[in-house]
Image: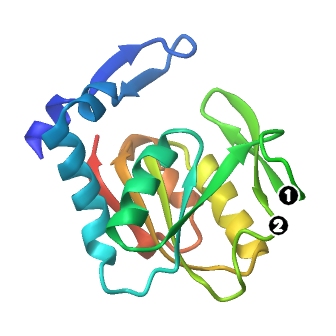
Amino acid sequence: MMELKSLIRDVPDYPIPGILFKDITPLLRHPGGLALAVELMANPFRGQGIDAVVGTESRGFIFGTAIAQALSCGFVPIRKAGKLPRATHQVAYGLEYGKDTVEVHVDSLKPGERVLLVDDLLATGGTLKAACDLIKRLEGNIVGIAVLIELVDLKGRNMLEDQSLLHAVMEM
């Protein structure tokens, strides 16, 4: 775990003053670090019959597609508003430093499909809560939430209806 933590850079005052951004690009560049991160995120969900991995834009796409491949299932992107070409469901939410809206195609999941939600980081919980709301709107069954990093001081897990679904590889 220390090796993975050493591959994450702190960037103060990004994207706005007062925010300490966790830069995962050194981890992504490191072949062993990337492979280990994906395995640690995927392993708790092996053999659980996951039908789809859902990842949030943008860094959730990186881990989500790799985890979907590791679990032999498909990937569904949750994108920022205006990025998907067909009919979508949308949810607006608050960020640590503003507001945003995410969306998913209305036909991305079949009712009852077993879903693993993936993102790189859990901060205030707004993005993951919005993603959970979208998955529920599609009648997906969320069986787990995997994040690489949880910023525990921000208490984002409190935004989740079922905190027991959360698997964080690292707490910072």
SS for callout 2:
loop
Q: Taking 126 as reference, is 142 above or below it?
A: below
Left or right of 69, for residue 58: right
Q: Residue drawn at (31%, 66%), measured in percent from left and top? A: 42
Q: Taking 141 as reference, is 55 above or below it?
A: above
Q: Residue 4 versus residue 20: which sits nearer the camera?
A: 4
- Label 1: few (<14), some (14–19) or many (≥20) C-alpha neighbours in 10 Å: some
Evaluate whether residue 122 shows in this view. no
**Number of callouts:** 2
Evaluate whether residue 87 shows in this view. yes
Q: Residue drawn at (51%, 50%), measured in percent from left and top? A: 156
Q: Earlier in the sequence, mark 2 or mark 1?
A: 1
Q: Residue drawn at (72%, 65%), measured in percent from left and top? A: 133
Q: Name the residue tied to disc 2.
A: 106
Q: Name the residue tied to disc 1.
A: 88
x and y, in percent, of residue 93 in the image: 74, 45
Q: Are marks 2 and 1 in contact (CB under 8 Å)?
A: yes
Left or right of 135, for residue 92: right
- What is the quadrant of residue 70 in the picture? bottom left
Q: Taking 165 as reference, is 6 above or below it?
A: above
Residue found at the far right of this picture: 87
x and y, in percent, of residue 120 in the image: 42, 45
x and y, in percent, of residue 52 in the image: 53, 73
Image quadrant for the C terminus?
A: top left
Report the colour scheme: rainbow
SS for callout 1:
strand
Q: Residue drawn at (71%, 74%), measured in percent from left and top? A: 136
- What is the quadrant of residue 86 in the picture? bottom right
x and y, in percent, of residue 16 in the image: 58, 13
Left or right of 93, for residue 166: left
- What is the quadrant of residue 149 in the picture? top left
The three-letter code of the residue at mark 2 reads Val
